[in-house]
Amino acid sequence: MTTRTLSEATETKTTRWLTLGEACKLLGVNESTLRRWADAGHVRSFRTPGGHRRFSEEDLRALIEGHTAERRASYRDLGQLALARIRRRLQRGRAQAAEWYTALPESTREKLRPLGRRLVALVSDYLGRGAQRGRLLDEAREIGLEYGRELKEEGLGLRAVVEAFVFFRRGLTDSAVELCQRSNLSAEEAVEVWDLLSTLADQVLVALAEAYSEGANGRS
């Protein structure tokens, strides 16, 4: 049991003890989640004479570091899951109804495959590297623009391009659901993954539309 008495807690002079609110802010979780973790023994805590919880900052930061490393490892798996899922769907004949795919010559598919692999890898980086998300969003937009320009040059209509986007986005989101289940992510963590994926995918979709609007009305 990690809930300690006040006298026991004060014996650890190097440990800084945080209030419930401070600890929640540090971890980025709600109070009920942190109480549950404390009751389960995942973090040290004690109660003041007034009955208020105090949490070890040292333990919380160790939890963050370990959790972050574990999540980054899981996010790296997302790219492989998504690529495998997309390939299977194309090989199993689901592309038969996808005119956007069957209409592309093999030379164009070969040209687009590296872009697709980079975009999937970028998704994994985006989920795991908070400090670099702005740069990664810019890169995702550039990939979307390049995709759109290539497909427009091949004569694909905008509707077909949106269908292609939906196909690949579904592959990513289905893989993300599988990842959340494998990693036993909490509801809050799963929502965060979904929000991040949606933000990135939205930027790619806007870039595709921008590529198709280039040159419209005599302007680029």
Image (tube, helix red, strand yellow):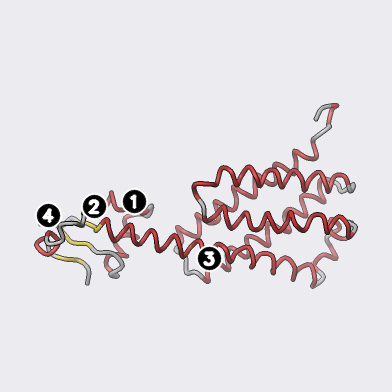
| Residue type pointed to by label 4 | Gly
Look at discs 4 and 1 and give the one toward the viewer.
Answer: 1
| Residue type pointed to by label 3 | Ser
Residue wearing tag 2: 18
The disc at residue 74 is 3
CA distance for labels 1 and 3: 22 Å
Q: Earlier in the sequence, mark 2 or mark 4?
A: 2
The disc at residue 50 is 4
Q: Residues within 10 Å of mark 1 (few under 14, many from 20)?
A: some
The disc at residue 26 is 1
| Residue type pointed to by label 1 | Leu
Look at discs 3 and 4 and give the one toward the viewer.
Answer: 3
Q: Earlier in the sequence, mark 4 or mark 1?
A: 1
Residue 21 appears left or right of 116: left
SS state under label 4? loop
- Whether tag 2 and tag 1 are in contact, CB under 8 A, the answer is yes
Q: Earlier in the sequence, mark 2 or mark 1?
A: 2
Q: Position of residue 200 (x, y in %)?
A: 61, 49
Q: Position of residue 115 (x, y in %)?
A: 74, 54
Q: Earlier in the sequence, mark 2 or mark 3?
A: 2
Q: Is residue 140 above or below residue 182?
A: above
SS state under label 3? helix
